Amino acid sequence: MNDPEGMMHRRMFLTLLGSALTSPAHEWMIAQPPQDMASTTGRLLSGDVVEHLDAVTASLRRMDDHLGSGQTLGLVRQHLRTVVGVLRERSYTDTVGRRLHGTAGELLRLAGWLSFDDGHHTQAQRFFIAGLYQANAAGDRGLGANILGFMSCQAKDLGQLRQAVTLAETARASYPATSPKVGAILDLRAAEAYANNRSVTDTRRALDRAFDKFTDSPAEHGDPDWSYWINEAQAHAQAGYCFVKLEDWPRARDHLRAALRLQNNEYTREGALRHALLATTYVQQEQPELDKALALGSQAVHTLTGQVTSTRCIKHVRNLVGALTPYRRTPAVRRFCQDARDLVAS
């Protein structure tokens, strides 16, 4: 039964979301970092402690790759409380203070991503916006641009398509392009936003820019650790997603196959997403190949049922089940839909 009140609240949330997301983005873009982030409260903190805090953050990022958002968010929030406590209760130099704010900003970004991946969009929005302010305090343009890219990703998933483009382009415009890997991340976010707006030319232009960056010289001072996940496999996966949105099934299939061929075992959740998207291309093409679609879809269901939790990826399995609806009289299709029923219902 429909819930008119729930639908009304959702519409109100989405209406507020547009301005609530883009306004902080523009404020961050023009804001100047504080002059001095030193503190004289409590015992002196050394830079070595920040190294240890960052090592924990790096472990949490990689834990998310294997376990998914549902099992990782609580640990991230606990670590964030530790970092915030250090910021408030210890004394440190300006350099150490900026590093601490950068650590807090990245944890807020990670918490926002995990909340988004688990379907908690209002909570994700709060984390992302708080992360932007921490990135400004740290004077870290790359971190802030990356947060804007994730905000763009959330906006497109919620149907805020113009805001998704605005956020992605603000991210690209605000980043000084010192790391080709970070630049590729931002170009891919823009490509996804344009693909959801059905802008073929802009999508392909952004994808070309992203892939070109993999042949650029490495960053002079190294890439930020949070950019570890971007590689050719992930670029092909995001390109495949873009062409699914553009309903260009052959190109989508080529990129998704390349992603699966190049990926390693660290990307369990992303592997499930790639299987679900690739399965969709076989259903939606002019002459459906149901056997291939069902085999790939079963792999995605298996991964999301027993290994990793991700509401975002389950949505794509739900889309696959919907695409298979015209073929439900086929016994194999009916069995797959029954197997996926509990996962999709969750």
Image (cartoon, grey):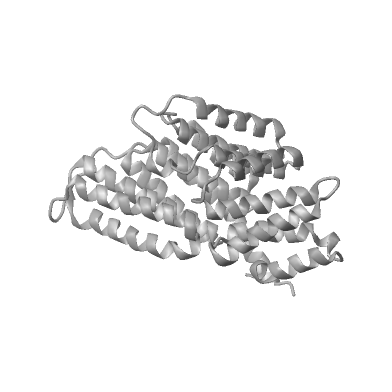
Residue shown at 40% from the left, 49% from the top: 131
In this view, which residue lies farthest toward the bottom? 1
Residue shown at 41% from the left, 46% from the top: 132
The answer to whether 33 is drawn above or below residue 8 in the figure is: above
Q: Position of residue 333 (x, y in %)?
A: 79, 63
Nearer-the-camera pick, 233 or 91: 233
Q: Position of residue 280 (x, y in %)?
A: 73, 51
In this view, which residue lies farthest toward the left? 43
- In this rendering, does residue 11 appear at all? no
Q: Quadrant of the C terminus?
A: bottom right
Q: Position of residue 126 (x, y in %)?
A: 46, 56
**Left or right of 26: which side holds 49?**
left
**In terms of image quadrants, where is residue 83?**
bottom left
Q: Position of residue 314 (x, y in %)?
A: 63, 61
Residue shown at 17% from the left, 47% from the top: 46
Nearer-the-camera pick, 240 or 128: 240
Number of numbered labels in the structure image: 0
**Left or right of 60: which side holds 194?**
right
Q: Quadrant of the N terminus?
A: bottom right
- In this rendering, does residue 283 appear at all? yes
Nearer-the-camera pick, 47 or 309: 309
The answer to whether 21 is drawn above or below residue 174 in the figure is: below
Residue shown at 76% from the left, 60% from the top: 322
Nearer-the-camera pick, 275 or 203: 275
**In terms of image quadrants, where is residue 88?**
bottom left
